[in-house]
Image (tube, helix red, strand yellow):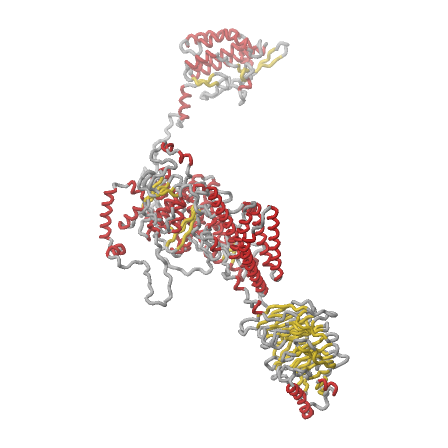
Amino acid sequence: MASKLVEKKRKVRVAESESEDEFAGGDFDGILSQSEDEFDVGSDEEHDDDEESANEGSRSEEDDGDSAILSDDIPSYIDGEEAMGKLIEDLPELEIEEPGVDPKRKENDDADRNYRVEKDANGNERYVYDEIDPVYDSDDSDAQGAVNTIGNIPLSFYDSYPHIGYDINGKKIMRPATGDALQSLLDSIEVPKGWTGVTDINTGNPLNLSQEELELVRRVQHGLLTDDLQDPYPETVEYFTSIEEKMPLSAAPEPKRRFLPSKNEAKQVMKLVRAIREGRILPYKPPEERQREEEEKEEVHFDLWQNEEAAAPNPMHIPAPKLPPPGYDMSYNPPEEYLPTKEEIEEWEKLDPEEREKDYMPQKYGALRKVPAWDTLVKERFERSMDLYLAPRVRKNRLNIDPNSLLPKLPSPFELKPFPTVAQTIFRGHEGRVRSVAIDPTGLVVASGGDDGTVRAWELLTGRQVWSVKLSSDEAVNAVRWRPTKDTFILAAATGEDIFLMVPIHPSVAPALDQASRDILAAGFGYATNGHQQTAPGKEPPAKWARPGAKLEDEGVLIRVTVRTTVKVINWHRRGDHFATVSPSGQRSSVAIHTLSKHLTQIPFRKLSGLAQTAAFHPSRPLFFVATQRTIRCYDLQKLELVKVVQPGAKWISSFDIHPGGDNLIVGSYDKRLLWHDLDLSNRPYKTMRFHSEAIRAVRYHRGGLPLFADTSDDGTIQIFHGKVPNDQLEHPTIVPVKILKGHKVVSKLGVLDMDWHPKEPWCVSAGADGTIRLWM
Amino acid sequence: MAKIKKKGQSGSTKNYITRTQAVKKLQISLPDFRKLCIWKGIYPREPRNKKKVSKSATASTTFYYTKDIQYLFHEPLLQKFRDQKVLEKKISRALGRGDVSDAARFERNASKPEQTGKPRYTLNHVIRERYPTFIDALRDLDDCLSMLFLFANLPSTSAVPAKMIARCERLCQEFQHYLIVSHSLRKSFLSIKGIYYQANIQGEDILWLVPYKFNQRIMGDIDFRIMGTFVEFYMTLLSFVNYRLYTSIGLKYPPKFDQSMDEQGAELAAFSLEGVNIATDGDAKAITNGESAHGPDPKVQAEVNKLVKQLKEDSSNGDTPMQTDAEEGEESATDAIDKFEPAAPGGDVLPQPEESISDPAQFFSNFTIFLSRETPRQPLEFILRAFGCKRIGWDAVLGEGSITTDETDPSITHQIVDRPVIQAAMNGNGDGEDNQTAQKLAPNQRYPGRIYVQPQWVWDSINDLELKSPELYAPGAALPPHLSPFVKAAPGAYDPTLPLDAQETEAEALDAELADADLEEGSDEDVQNDMDVDSGSEDKDDENEDNFGGFSEGEGEEEEDEEESATLQRQRELEAELSGKSLKSKSTDAKTKAKLEAKKALDKKAREEAEDLERAKGMLSKKKRKLFEQMQYTNNKKSAEDLKLRSKRRKLEKEKAKANGKAEVRFR
């Protein structure tokens, strides 16, 4: 109980000190409200002891007494006097109610201690301290009593308590009584001076402001100084310039720059002036106006090409190609044949857009109004722009020529004729292979030689054997060749190492011709006996010329020439006085040239690179061709020098022939190739023909003016070609394969061994390994 | 010892530079480089050997000539680009500092072509460089016009500012005005993509495409920045070209532009051309009939005109000597080509260009043409005016600028209509009158004394420079095909204007006749037979193709053919038996037999030719043969296309004939 008492006392004391403060401030309005508060506090305290929490029931009870005072007196200024009177009355009452305060204080004063000792209910000693009396400065208007010390926390924490915090002495500050609705309505109607409608968080009372405070707020709001007394802009007092010194601080004369205009400034100004004159600095205009002006400003129009000069076009510049003009199928109403069929549309749609040949399908619209916009027009235009700037341009030379002009002018099959096509006659009689065949210069008789060692003469057209002679019993006849002049009827045949020259006995041969032939053959004997001593005595002659014996002479064989090795090839010179023989196995004496009129044999080459295969005279000039395995060498017989080396590129040359014109050469080889050489053009072949499946045995040009040549092969065929050599040097020869003649049988891998052309007609004879000779026409 | 050569230091590699290198060298961004290339007309090149040229290991795709890039170094535009870059950097830096007012100031100074439509730089010097002469510029005008006409019809977006579109439209219309005044439009073609126009200016043919007036669909992945760059260049080019063209015929450029008229959709009529001096003023005024419609009293106008004319003759005798000459005497000199008559026989005949009978300037000059509201007004107005039509009226819906919007105007000679004939209205003529407006006629009502044609009539007429017969182009009629005037007839190519007989080969004709004959035989029987015939002919084609391949078989095939025909004959007999009819072919066969034989002969000839060809080809070297085959390939492709077209046409004609025949039968 005692503590409660103390509390009460404290409260009163606080109220007292407050009221004193107020009076000291001289604010009467404040007193009214303040005193009212105190009263409330006091009345609250009475019930505080009984009930801890502020429940409504007790509230209403207190209100019976107090609210009358509150509502009636306090806010109204009309009965302010009454209220004062009441207050004054109340104050003594309070003092009467708490009598123990004053004597204790006296005690306190006496003891001069800040506490006093009391006895509590149990009789123990208890220290009771004095109340703190903070001494504030008088001008501190904020420092009002009963300041809430709860700190910066929301007041709502105390909502469930009757107090709203604690003062500096640790005493509860009780919640002021709030008016009911009517009260607040009244408050709002009759607004007291300084009423703000705001509740003071420290006390929970309505916060009213004094006139001074309001004025202060107004000033702060308007950004004025808080105090009227201060003059913010006092007159300047120019202490130094206004007072002229009698004695100057510096005795220096006034510098020149003080009274001359500045050069630098003049420069700056001139800069600006110039900028203004040149229009670099424009008078200020609001941005909107400037923008409008710019928009309105018309662009300048002038003739860009006023003084145009045509410059030579840059050779490196490629102008962009123009887009092709639209064709018929782009029409909105094309002819009906341009419209695609269903399949075409499907195919077009199936393709990737990039692969399509055209980017549109022709379409027909019945009327112009039905034509829609083209979907991809913008895209197409964009692609065109991309092409213009990003596509590399290349100048492509388009051959604007008729493709047919590229084709060579081929002779028509009509022009190619005549050429042999069928086997007209088959000559049978030889036993074993027929090695060689030749048609005489008149074209009536065919001579042949074969493995049976006989030389036979046949009538060309009928195939009847007219003459036969057996030259050797054990060796084959390797070559038969007619002397190429028409004034004689002389045949040369080679058997083993012997070469026989003979005049076949034939009914069609006129006796005069026969005699002339025999004379020519015999003429050499006289010469040989006369000039025999020419050869060096110690040396063996390269060949022996002799008569073959009476038996053979009766048959018509008149001369036998014996050389050192087996002769395989005989070739006559065009005049018929010389003939060349080749015997591949003979090392040094493989090639021999025989002179008929002198019965003389010469060996032109001491040494040959490679094995000689065949040799021939040039048809018009004194040239001599010798074929070794790989090359053909051309020698000048007059100058005795090497003229040319032809390299056909074949691995093993079997035979060659020279065109009657003399500038072209055909070469057959065992490696199945037939090669045409243009001697003027190159050493290499002009054309290579590989039409045979087996080795080529013989090649032969037609000598009677027809552009034909043929080759024979071990595959049993004869191939006929049309080979025209133009008169013009610039043109190349035309070679056309025309015919394959089949008929000969292949016997033990040997097919057709030799062939020869008729001197005038397009006929040829061939000698086969099957023992037949065939005439093709 | 020789120095070891480094890669990329000498040879052709020095002539080329890749794009990345070029951009680095010029120190500009790729978009700027792109702009520069577009404007300066610099394009990539294709080196002979890319590997030799590229300095890096990876394959570069785009190469430029080093000299081209070197040439860009001196471009003044380069400096502008750099300035722009600097400015942008300044702005971004100011923003980074939070200095908004500074950034705003820089921003204000920056050129914003997307807003104003006008950049700070001009492309005048570029155009002068690229086109040193005016003719050069004309030669390159195709793409320019196509692009600008397209942009004039685009909707405005953020990428395509409205100002740009407006300017494109204006430039295009100015150009059209020149064509109208100078009558230099030559041809036009309605394609599925748009309308092609061809004009001849100073001897240069210019072809361009104008889209139909619809909202253009803009597909994805179109970079409008690139297009915009082109458009910027083309706009400058066309404005200079327009200036030159206008001044060349004594007109003032730019022509006066009436904003209010344009807003009412007057288009071409919104411009009024003015002469540089008064002499040409009168002529120019006549072009825009919109003005004459709104002009003062015609009587007064006539008097004034007369006065002006007098004045003109007095004042500008020197200016127009031609005119005065003509008035003085008709025999005086003209610039027409004289006809050279041979004085004595025996000389060669030299061809002369013929003066066309109908002058494009006078082509439509006597007509008053009214356009119905469903017709495309812009192209029609342009073409009609360019071909001399002075009086064109159209429905008020189509916009301002017509001489009359009254369809009932009696002075109208031609009306262009593009609507179908409505059957219902045909029947009830009385119904037609309760239309909302009195001046409009009922849908099918015809005004007497007037020719009604579809729009294609105008195009076909101007392309051939002769007035086509309007019956063919009557409203609702099936139109004759619209043919492109730009196709030049190549020898041997298919030409739809010629009759089929004139251009098909002998073999084809024979084939067709044979097929016909078969058809006649089989026509009574079934449609299925038709099919048979078709397939038969196809088979024959196939055989022919086979024959080309193997020529060497020779004689055997003829026999085969004969055998085949024999089997065919037997087949036919069998079929006839089945269908229970006697084979009446004996009599008709005489004819068909002859034809068959002719065909056989032809086949043989073709085969022989093919054989020859093959032989000749065999003689060619490999290189030449390949070249030959390539050439042959393209030729064959073309001829195959032609063949297809001809066969399609034959089929169509046959169908038509059949239909006609049937119709006639029904008629009886």
User: A415 or A496: nearer the eye?
Assistant: A415
State the image coordinates of residue B503 (x, y, percent, origin top left). Answer: 48, 55
Judged left or right of residue A50, residue A251 is left
State the image coordinates of residue B102 (x, y, percent, origin top left). Answer: 43, 41
| Figure check: A55 above or below A150 | above
Judged left or right of residue A525, residue B599 is left
Q: How many marks?
A: 0
Furthest residue in direction bottom, as rendered: A530
Work out whether residue A471 can be spotted: yes
Judged left or right of residue A466, residue A305 is left
Furthest residue in direction right, as rendered: A474
Q: Quadrant of the N terminus of chain A?
A: top right
State the image coordinates of residue A273 (x, y, percent, origin top left). Answer: 33, 47
State the image coordinates of residue B366 (x, y, percent, origin top left). Answer: 32, 47
| Figure check: A136 above or below B452 | above
Judged left or right of residue B174, residue A495 is right
Q: Quadrant of the C terminus of chain A?
A: bottom right
| Figure check: B44 above or below A16 | below
User: B418 or A652: nearer the eye?
Assistant: B418
User: A417 or A616: nearer the eye?
Assistant: A417
Work out whether residue A351 can be spotted: no
User: A252 or B264: nearer the eye?
Assistant: B264
| Figure check: A192 above or below A684 | above
